[in-house]
Amino acid sequence: METLSTPLPKKEIIVLQNIMEDFACATDLGAVIVDIRGKESSSLYNFSPFCEAMRNYPEFHKLCQKCDMYGGLEASKTGKPCIYRCHAGLTDVSLPIVFNDQLHGFLLMGQLEVDPKYADEMPKIQEIDSNWKAYKDLRTARNSVLTLSPEKIKSAARLLEKICSHHSEETHPRDRITFNFKQEKTKEPQPTGKDEIQKATQYIQKNISKTITLEEVANHVYLSQYYFSKLFKKETGINFITYLNQQRIERAKILLQQSDLSIETISHNVGFSQASYFCKTFKQFTNTTPATYRKEYNLG
């Protein structure tokens, strides 16, 4: 995924601005759109007096932008909301903006206080602690910051993600990471993505020994779970879980043939958490047990 400093097409910018402005108005949370360097590329929607005052000081403004950038980059690693605390100790949430497989910036919302006992749930994005308490206007403005529980912050993050994801169902899959922009109304999209499925199967082969989920692989190729599932079955002829188990059993057969590893060890090496489930799945695909398969292979 490449990173760009160039702005999004005007239509997509307007969509995002409307989403963020409405979200800030409805939730009373601060919101802003920033580029990949953390610099504001939209209005400051519903910013708290504290954060507005902080950004009036050049040294603090620079730290704010750095936190916004770091939080966004963390979010872009998974395509999911990243919840973190900024240099002033407030909790923020970041979502990546990906368009045509390129990272253009981040959506940010929050500017919230949480009870200190939940601090570990909201890790600091930087180890820097700014000396904002030395300024009387900032100390006064801090009292106006909204306080929410971690559960409500996480709910707000999921809500923003879902609002943005609502625009993704009728767009080209390359225009998506965790959300996208509705460019035009169309009929049910027709799956056409051999490159995405090839990339998905390569990812499965590379990570066959790990726990792999449909959501994880769909995110890897920048598709919604629904679209990916439909496309995968069209291109491979079988559903995702069947394919995944099929590949695991094929790998297990090789280990049974070429190693003296125990059945339990082999089951873990091909991504099964329980040997009993591995044996059950193995028999479904081969009509025999792993132990019998190994014995018959050695005799043959």
Image (cartoon, helix red, strand yellow):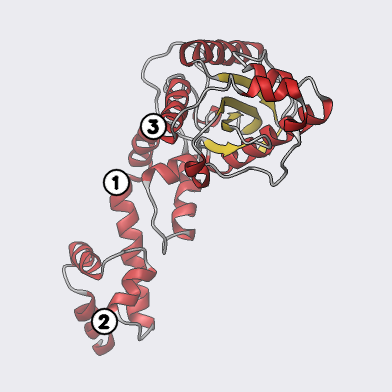
Horizontally, residue 121 falls left or right of residue 300, namely right
Front position in the image: 1 or 254 = 1
Name the amino acid type tagged 3.
Tyr
Task: Examine the rendered structure and indicate whether residue 141 appears above or below residue 218.
Answer: above
Name the amino acid type tagged 1.
Ile
Q: Is residue 1 visible?
A: no
Q: Nearer the viewer, mark 3 or mark 1?
A: 3
In the figure, residue 10 lies in which quadrant? top right
Between the residue at mark 3 and the residue at mark 1, the CA separation in whole angstroms equals 15 Å
Residue at which label 2 appears? 294
Determine whether the residue tagged by mark 1 lies in a helix, strand or loop.
loop
Name the outermost residue toward the bottom.
Answer: 299
Which mark is on residue 207? none
Where is residue 195 drawn, in percent x and y? Answer: 51, 41
Determine whether the residue tagged by mark 2 lies in a helix, strand or loop.
helix
Residue at horizontal 31 percent and vertical 59 percent from the top: 246
Where is residue 225 drawn, in percent x and y? Answer: 38, 36
The crowding category of the residue bearing disc 3, from other C-alpha atoms within 10 Å (few below 14, some 14 to 19, many at least 20), is: some
Between the residue at mark 3 and the residue at mark 2, the CA separation in whole angstroms equals 39 Å
Mark 3 vs 2, N-terminal side: 3
Front position in the image: 231 or 35 = 35
In the figure, residue 8 lies in which quadrant? top right
Horizontally, residue 198 falls left or right of residue 285, namely right
Front position in the image: 174 or 159 = 159
Residue at horizontal 46 percent and vertical 30 percent from the top: 153
Residue at which label 1 appears? 238
Determine whether the residue tagged by mark 3 lies in a helix, strand or loop.
helix
Task: Examine the rendered structure and indicate whether residue 88 appears above or below residue 276.
Answer: above
Q: Nearer the viewer, mark 3 or mark 2?
A: 3
Where is residue 257 drawn, in percent x and y? Answer: 34, 80
Which mark is on residue 227? 3
